[in-house]
Image (cartoon, rainbow, N blue to C red):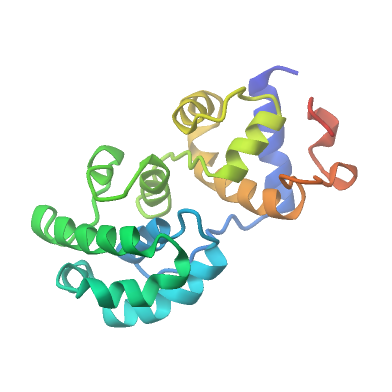
Amino acid sequence: MRKKERTLAAVESLERLYPEAICSLQYDDPFQLLIATRLSAQCTDKRVNMVTPDLFCEFPTAEKMATADLSRVEALIKTCGLYKTKARDLVGIGKEITERFGGRVPDTIEELTTLPGVGRKTANLVCGDIYGQAAVVTDTHFIRICNRLGLVSTTNPLVVEREMRKLLPPEKSNDFCHRTVLFGRDICKAQRPKCDVCPLSEFCPKKL
């Protein structure tokens, strides 16, 4: 089975397994998704979702975040890890969006990645979930699963994104990324993957 065929088979299998492709992060608007995604670096989505309600209650918009007291932001996000760096980035993001983009979260990867602490993974998620663009979010689950399926042979996020853009149907790429996160947590785990119950095992060349 060629890579393209294997990709399409994986897309169809995960669509059946997870009919609703949902982002695990909770948010109400583009700014909140951007902030939540920045917080999720080296932190679980579950923890982020515990922190953001209080954070967004005090700083619900880019304008509010831009004028936030840094120590207060640090206190609110402390349990997310790397909180000093993240707090500095959050305030910086608020300022940049307010001053450079008129309060609107940018809709291109190129513009989003000029914001403090925002990389391509975060930018892809925002472009896909908010603006409906074809996106490839290279989180750890996505990278692991694409490697196990033999679709890529690298853990470099940029290379994985580039290669998977060639293989995934553009209109399905964003949802597929969400589904791989759910799949990676439930079945194709980093340690002890459940190959015996995996719906992708029949065409997975690296079945363990």
Q: Nearer the viewer, residue 37 or 6?
A: 37
The residue positioned 44% from the left and 75% from the top of the image is: 51
> In the displayed structure, does residue 185 sit left or right of residue 154?
right
State which quarter of the image contains the N terminus: top right
The residue positioned 27% from the left and 78% from the top of the image is: 72
Can residue 60 be spotted in the picture?
Answer: no
Estimate the x, y position of residue 110 in percent, counting from the top left. Answer: 26, 37
- Looking at the image, which residue sits at the far right? 196
Estimate the x, y position of residue 16 in percent, counting from the top left. Answer: 73, 49
In this rendering, is residue 37 above or below 77? above
The residue positioned 87% from the left and 47% from the top of the image is: 197
Estimate the x, y position of residue 139 in percent, counting from the top left. Answer: 53, 44
State which quarter of the image contains the C terminus: top right
Q: Nearer the viewer, residue 14 or 161?
A: 161
Report the number of discs: 0
- Looking at the image, which residue sits at the far left? 99
Quadrant in the picture for residue 149: top right
Q: Nearer the viewer, residue 73 or 122?
A: 73
> In the displayed structure, does residue 68 sit left or right of residue 205?
left
> In the displayed structure, does residue 88 sit left or right of residue 122?
left
Quadrant in the picture for residue 19: bottom right
Estimate the x, y position of residue 6 in percent, counting from the top left. Answer: 70, 26
> In the displayed structure, does residue 106 sit left or right of residue 15?
left
Can residue 103 be spotted in the picture?
Answer: yes
In this rendering, is residue 175 above or below 49? above
